Image: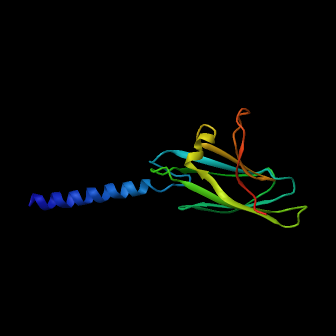
């Protein structure tokens, strides 16, 4: 009789372990994460005065919705990095060009785990939309920024 109880207990324990393992694989925005740590992304409109930036950022698990950023304004989010360190966020960005008279747009990865080395303290990732594209930068004057992706023409 004891064997049936042990099988049931073993089944439940196995199911619990699998559930816990699978939950660790998902990234969480501003939530508890038991995987590989947390990161934050700060996206700033640094294009030009009187230029409004429109942004729609998401990952496989989280759609952050559409955002409207005035010049100098930032949008930020924090999230857990999944167990396999494959967390990825990408953004579609666009603005109405003042002198060009059309829509300038771009789309690309705003965060990948392999970019953490280029982030402040290896977890605060600063991004700026500028005239030539979206840049990753640090506040360290010794560290040069670099373009993550350019605008499409």
At 10% from the left edge and 58% from the top edge, which residue is drawn? Answer: 2
Decide if residue 143 is on the left or right side of residue 114: right
At 53% from the left edge and 53% from the top edge, which residue is drawn? Answer: 87
Decide if residue 99 is on the left or right side of residue 105: right
Q: Where, by quadrant of the figure, is residue 96 drawn?
A: bottom right
Which quadrant is home to the N terminus?
bottom left
Q: How far across and how far down the image is residue 51, in percent? A: 84, 58
| Direction left: furthest residue | 1
Q: Taking the image as drawn, is residue 54 in sight?
A: yes
Closer-to-camera residue (25/115) = 115
Decide if residue 64 is on the left or right side of residue 152: left
Closer-to-camera residue (105/18) = 105
| Direction right: furthest residue | 99
Closer-to-camera residue (140/26) = 140
Q: How far across and how far down the image is residue 111, in percent? A: 61, 51
> Against 69, is 143 above or below?
above
Q: Where, by quadrant of the figure, is residue 122 drawn?
A: top right
Q: Where, by quadrant of the figure, is residue 97 drawn?
A: bottom right
| Direction bottom: furthest residue | 102
Which quadrant is home to the C terminus?
bottom right
Decide if residue 29 is on the left or right side of residue 127: left
At 13% from the left edge and 62% from the top edge, which residue is drawn? Answer: 4
Q: How far across and how far down the image is residue 81, in percent? A: 51, 49
> Against 141, is 84 above or below?
below
Q: How far across and how far down the image is residue 84, in percent? A: 45, 51
Q: How is the rendered protein coloured?
A: rainbow
At 64% from the left edge and 49% from the top edge, which residue is drawn? Answer: 41
Q: Taking the image as drawn, is residue 55 in sight?
A: no
| Direction front: furthest residue | 153
């Amino acid at each position: 009789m004891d064997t049936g109880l042990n099988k049931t207990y073993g089944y439940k324990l196995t199911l619990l372990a699998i559930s816990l393992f699978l939950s660790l694989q998902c990234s969480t925005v501003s939530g508890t994460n038991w995987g590989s740590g947390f990161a934050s992304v700060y996206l700033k409109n640094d294009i030009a005065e009187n230029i409004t930036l429109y942004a729609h950022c998401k990952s496989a698990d989280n759609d952050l919705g559409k955002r409207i950023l005035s010049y100098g304004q930032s949008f930020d989010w924090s999230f857990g990095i999944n167990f396999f360190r494959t967390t990825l966020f990408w953004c579609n960005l666009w603005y109405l060009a003042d002198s060009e008279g059309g829509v300038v747009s771009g789309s690309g990865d705003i965060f990948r785990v392999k970019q953490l080395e280029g982030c402040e303290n290896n977890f605060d990732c600063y991004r700026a939309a500028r005239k030539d594209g979206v840049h990753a930068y640090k506040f360290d004057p010794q560290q040069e920024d670099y373009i993550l992706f350019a605008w499409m023409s």
